[in-house]
Image (cartoon, rainbow, N blue to C red):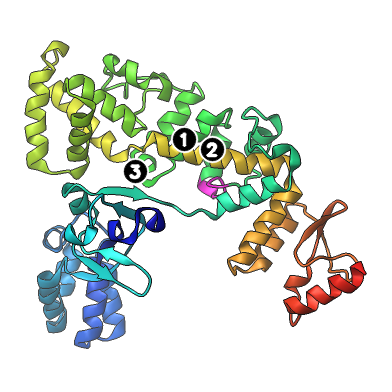
């Protein structure tokens, strides 16, 4: 991107990090000289919360107030911490964010230089407000693994996969998902065990639901129960069943999962353009009380045709707001689901090629090979020891297993390997 659009038009994005209340208390305890045990107890008395300010914590938790009043140093620490709460402690670069400008970016945003790149000094929301286009580029080693595996399979040179492959779904639903992108965790395996994956759409739904918000809200349980016909489908709940939402929610069992569903609902009820519905969606997930109150007034005026009471309208509005915070981008989920399926398909149908690709990419990245080889042995892959007459530089398929390459043997360099192969071929 930097080469194509040129460095004067392209930059990475800064991110700012402030200390959590717990970290702030711990660091101040150390700086002021409170003994380690007391500092640790003080820090542990603070609840973990991203929403509560220090003032809120002080009002809400008796244990915190008791600790502060227990000695003078604790009181000093609390007083100082309230003054520096929210101050940025460090900066870093956005994991995959890049901004591109048609004009010289140095004239639009202040720039910070490090050893490798230039980074904007405005964070991402400000950059969007001043009209810069932000892209997210995620580098996944999984893509390299897929491409390398395909290169080893002549009949898969086009990269096309049968999305209804029996062996793939059988492997997934047997919970044999180690080395399968995004399906390796115990939590995801529990979801699959409760309700087997039947098609690519199930993968899209599961990826979108397997996140803290939907799990904590209970949406995952409701979705799986409805998918398994264990409970009736409502839109979204029995107590708050708005049948007119069926047009948006029928394919997700009455649950709002995707941002695109929220945007479509907003566009319909607010009678606005797609562009304006995106702006309203951003306000909803910002949790600004004043802006939400203004939005609700507009919502009331636009929704008179629904013939709902003010109370029902308020419930509907805040239901949409809550789901907006949990919702996931469907396009993103589609892209990830494709990668999930490709890795599952390759593992189910071309196990040895897929395993060699995983080993090779890990080796290139300098990762510990002992762990992946141990895991592959657990799933039944047989490894042959290095053989001076058979091994190549890297791992390769041999008989019904994988033959070690010379490159993993200590104290053997590339020149020595080249000489072995040269004289052997001679």
Query: Marks 3 and 1, how far apart in space?
Result: 19 Å
Query: Marks 3 and 2, how far apart in space?
Result: 23 Å
| SS category of the residue bearing label 1 | helix
Q: Is residue 13 left or right of residue 339?
A: left
Q: In this rendering, does residue 179 appear at all?
A: no
> Which region shows up in magenta?
181-187
Q: Position of residue 297 (x, y in %)?
A: 6, 27
Q: Is residue 377 left or right of residue 197?
A: right
In reply to whether residue 1 is colored magenta, the answer given is: no
| Residue ID for mark 2 | 338
Quarter containing the C terminus: bottom right
Q: Position of residue 239 (x, y in %)?
A: 27, 22
- Asked if marks 2 and 1 touch (Cβ < 8 Å), the reply is yes
- Mark drawn on residue 213: 3
**Dominant secondary structure, magenta:** loop
| Residue ID for mark 1 | 334
Sequence-first disc among 3 and 2? 3
Mark 1 surroundings: few (<14), some (14-19) or many (≥20) residues within 10 A: some
Q: Position of residue 73 (x, y in %)?
A: 15, 83
Q: Marks 3 and 1: which is nearer the front?
A: 1
Q: Quadrant of residue 67?
A: bottom left
Q: Position of residue 265 (x, y in %)?
A: 25, 24
């Amino acid at each position: 991107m930097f080469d194509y659009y040129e460095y004067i038009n392209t930059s990475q994005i800064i991110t700012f990090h402030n200390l959590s209340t717990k970290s702030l208390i711990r660091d101040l305890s150390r700086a002021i000289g409170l003994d380690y045990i007391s500092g640790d107890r003080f820090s542990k008395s603070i609840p973990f919360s991203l929403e509560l300010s220090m003032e809120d914590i002080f009002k809400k938790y008796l244990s915190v107030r008791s600790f502060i009043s227990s000695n003078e140093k604790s009181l000093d620490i609390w007083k100082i911490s309230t003054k520096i709460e929210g101050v940025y402690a460090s900066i870093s670069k956005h994991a995959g964010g890049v901004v591109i400008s048609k004009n010289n970016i140095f004239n639009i945003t202040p720039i910070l230089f490090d050893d490798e790149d230039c980074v904007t000094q405005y964070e991402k929301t400000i950059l969007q407000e001043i009209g810069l286009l932000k892209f997210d580029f995620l580098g996944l080693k999984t893509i390299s693994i897929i491409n390398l595996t395909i290169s080893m399979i002549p009949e898969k040179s086009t990269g096309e996969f049968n999305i209804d492959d029996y062996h793939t779904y059988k492997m997934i639903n047997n919970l044999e998902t180690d080395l399968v992108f995004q399906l390796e965790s115990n939590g995801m395996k529990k979801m699959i065990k409760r309700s087997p994956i039947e098609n690519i759409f199930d993968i899209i739904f599961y990826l979108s639901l397997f996140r803290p918000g939907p799990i904590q809200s209970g949406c995952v349980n409701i979705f799986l129960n409805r998918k398994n016909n264990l409970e009736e489908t409502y839109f979204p709940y029995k107590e708050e069943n708005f049948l007119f939402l069926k047009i948006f929610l029928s394919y997700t069992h009455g649950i709002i999962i995707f941002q695109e569903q929220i945007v479509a609902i907003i566009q319909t009820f607010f009678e606005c353009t797609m562009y304006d519905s995106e702006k309203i969606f951003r306000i909803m997930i910002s949790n600004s009380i004043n802006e939400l109150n203004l939005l609700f007034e507009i919502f009331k005026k636009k929704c008179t045709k629904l013939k709902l009471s003010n109370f029902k309208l308020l419930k509907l509005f805040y239901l949409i707001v809550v789901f907006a915070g949990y919702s996931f981008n469907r396009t993103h989920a589609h892209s990830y689901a494709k990668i999930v399926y490709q890795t599952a398909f390759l593992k189910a149908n071309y196990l040895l090629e897929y395993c060699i690709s995983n080993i090779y990419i890990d080796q290139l990245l300098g990762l510990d090979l002992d762990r992946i080889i141990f895991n592959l042995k657990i799933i039944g892959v047989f490894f042959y020891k290095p053989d001076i007459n058979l091994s190549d530089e890297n791992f390769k398929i041999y008989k019904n297993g994988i033959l070690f390459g010379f490159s993993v043997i200590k104290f053997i360099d590339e020149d020595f390997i080249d000489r072995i192969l040269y004289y052997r071929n001679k």
